[in-house]
Amino acid sequence: MLRRVHIFMGLFLALYFLPHVNHKILFFPIVLISSIIPDLDTIFFPHKTHYKIIKMLKSEPYKNFMHSYTLCIFLSLILAFFYPIIALPFFIGYSFHLFFESLTTYGTRPFWPAKIRSKGFIAPEGTIEKTLTVILGILSVILILGYLI
């Protein structure tokens, strides 16, 4: 999925859960940041630079590892032990990223290193993905307006 889908998804989730959390200042940015963490390779390494690094980062094992609940749960448990306040928002952002990725035709291996793959019906950069981006954006605006009124 495109990065903007994950950003809008993180924005919507942060806004949706915001009234129910105590540490709003921490919660909001952590959900947003963690919703794009699995795709950090494409953010820090553009397509034409560092070709060998990109090739390694986009390889099947790396994508499977970064896009797995195995890593999500492991990192969330570490955060829960050392920084419990940020563990839940981290888990929310990261896990919803994985859920949305599992809806694509490429899918994910949710419990890497297990070979089971979860695939969906949404074509990357297709009409459904673009529609989902617009819907998440509209819902986010509605939530923002609801907080302001």
Image (tube, rainbow, N blue to C red):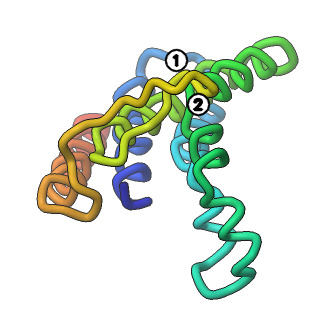
Mark 2 neighbour density, 10 Å: few (under 14) some (14–19) many (20 or more): many
Residue 15 position in % (x across, y down): 38, 35
Residue 66 in view, yes or no: yes
CA gap, disc 1 and disc 2:
8 Å
Say which quadrant the C terminus sits in. top left
Q: Residue 52 is drawn in which quadrant?
A: bottom right
In the image, is residue 50 above or below residue 8? below
What residue does disc 2 label?
27
Residue 37 position in % (x across, y down): 61, 47
Do the residues under discs 1 and 2 have CB atoms within 8 angstroms?
yes
Q: SS for tag 1?
A: loop
Task: Give the residue furthest to the front.
Answer: 115
Residue 78 position in % (x across, y down): 81, 19
Work out whether mark 1 precedes mark 2 in sequence or the reverse, and give the earlier one.
1
What residue does disc 1 label?
21
45 or 131, nearer to the observer: 45
- Under mark 2, the amino acid is Phe
In the image, is residue 138 above or below residue 147? below
Q: SS for tag 2?
A: helix
* Residue for point 69% across, 85% down: 49
- Under mark 1, the amino acid is Val
